[in-house]
């Protein structure tokens, strides 16, 4: 006997059922994943299913489908809203759970987020990084002591890696530089 003995409607161990749901989604096994989701739902554990689905959207899919967590959250919100309508005996909120399970099954997958979490959080206390020089700017005492004002921030603090220029971005950058340097005869640099 485990610490918690929770049994589902069809006499499955709750934790084994939950594990089966997650492993089937990871493997894209749609029919089986739906079976385990329904088993947990029918056993009164819909909130737990949604907790697992939300976690999996980061843990098992993550950056392979960057907006999936928002999609899963939206489906969860629709599920909750629909579930408030107790007079509808067809339980249409199940549509949104089914949608989420199938979406996760069919998603491209990546464990990067989970691997990064484990590395960053487990090793944090053993690492000590120096503050990079570019972080010292007009927004902190050391940057102000170094006389780093708007000009420095505009040149150094706004540097972007993996920059994807947008229409009119350079036009507005130049306008911003002019406004910062002379917004109306009162320069900030």
Image: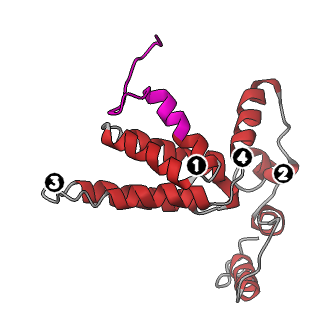
Name the N-terminal-most of marks 1 and 3: 1
Residue found at the far top of this picture: 1
Give residue 146's mark: 2
* SS state under label 4: loop
Dot placed on the residue nearer the N-terminal end, 3 or 4:
3
In the image, is residue 173 above or below residue 146?
A: below
Q: Are marks 2 and 3 in contact (CB under 8 Å)?
A: no
Q: Mark 4 sits on what residue? A: 111
- Provide residue 63's location: percent of width, then percent of height: 69, 57
Q: Are marks 2 and 1 in contact (CB under 8 Å)?
A: no
Q: Position of residue 22 (x, y in %)?
A: 56, 42
Nearer the N terminus, badge 2 or badge 4?
4
Magenta residues, start to end: 1-20
**Which label lies toward us, 2 or 3?**
3
Say which quarter of the image contains residue 66: bottom right
101 drawn magenta: no
Comes first in the chain, label 2 or label 1? 1
Which residue lies under the disc numbered 3?
Answer: 86
């Amino acid at each position: 006997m485990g610490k918690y003995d929770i049994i589902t409607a069809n006499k499955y161990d709750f934790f084994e059922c939950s594990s089966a749901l997650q492993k089937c989604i990871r493997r894209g096994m749609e029919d089986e994943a739906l079976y385990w989701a329904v088993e947990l739902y029918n056993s009164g554990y819909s909130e737990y299913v949604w907790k697992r689905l939300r976690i999996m959207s980061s843990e098992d899919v993550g950056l392979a489908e960057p907006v999936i967590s928002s999609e899963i959250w939206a489906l969860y919100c629709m599920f909750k809203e629909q579930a408030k309508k107790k007079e509808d005996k067809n339980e249409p909120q199940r549509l949104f759970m089914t949608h989420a399970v199938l979406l996760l099954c069919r998603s491209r997958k990546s464990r990067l987020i989970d691997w990064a979490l484990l590395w960053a959080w487990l090793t944090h206390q053993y690492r000590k990084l120096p503050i990079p020089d570019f972080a010292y700017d007009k927004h902190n005492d050391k940057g102000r002591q170094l006389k780093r004002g708007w000009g420095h921030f505009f040149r150094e603090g706004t540097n972007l890696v993996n920059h994807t220029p947008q229409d009119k971005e350079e036009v507005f950058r130049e306008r911003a530089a002019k406004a910062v340097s002379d917004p109306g005869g009162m320069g900030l640099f």
